[in-house]
Amino acid sequence: MEIKKIALAGTLESSDVQVTVEPFDKGVKLSLESSVMNQYGQQIKETVLETLDRLEVKNIKISLVDKGALDCTIKARIECAVLRACETSDKNIAWGGMIK
């Protein structure tokens, strides 16, 4: 998938994550800010990279502000932000079917 514009998904509420994606032409640039960085930072990074791989995103700048979100929430927010940034038509989106 090709990122065409800046897009956002999620909130800064407790147990959520705010994901911002934007076009980038040199691979994946990941920025992570988390209230649970010491405990789960590596797991969150792995989840982000795995989700981007499943969505077939090769070039992206992605920033996450995590407030203790579960992996399923992180995946859903990334999927939403990426699909918004790719300007995918609502009619062609298989929500929840693209990633496991």
Image (cartoon, rainbow, N blue to C red):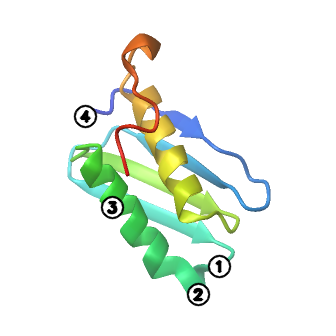
Question: In screen coordinates, is 9 left or right of 31?
Answer: right
| Badge 1 density bin: few <14, some 14–19, many ≥20, Cα 10 Å | few
The amino acid at mark 1 is: Val
Is mark 1 in CB contact (under 8 Å) with mark 2? yes
Residue 39 is tagged as: 2
Few, some or many C-alpha atoms within 10 Å of disc 2 (few <14, some 14-19, many ≥20)?
few
Which amino acid, by three-letter code, is at mark 3? Leu
Q: Distance between the Cα atoms at labels 3 and 4?
A: 14 Å
Q: Give the mark nearest the N terminus, 4 or 1.
A: 4
Local secondary structure at mark 1:
loop
The residue tagged 3 is: 49
Task: Tell me which residue sits at (53%, 63%) in the image.
Answer: 71
Amino acid type at circle 2 is Gln
Q: Quick check: 6 above or below 66?
A: above
How many residues crowd around disc 4 within 10 Å: few (fewer than 14), some, or many (20 or more)?
some
Mark 3 or mark 4, earlier in chain: 4
Residue corresponding to mark 4: 1
**Image coords of residue 80 (percent x, y):** 50, 36
Question: Distance from label 4 to label 2 (Cα)?
Answer: 31 Å
Label for residue 19? none
Q: Which mark is residue 36?
A: 1
Query: Would you say 80 lies left or right of 2 here?
Result: right
Percent position of residue 78, x then y: 47, 47
Question: What residue lies at 58% left-to-right and 88% top-to-bottom?
Answer: 38
**Distance between the alpha carbons at the discs numbered 1 and 3:** 18 Å
x and y, in percent, of residue 28 in the image: 28, 56
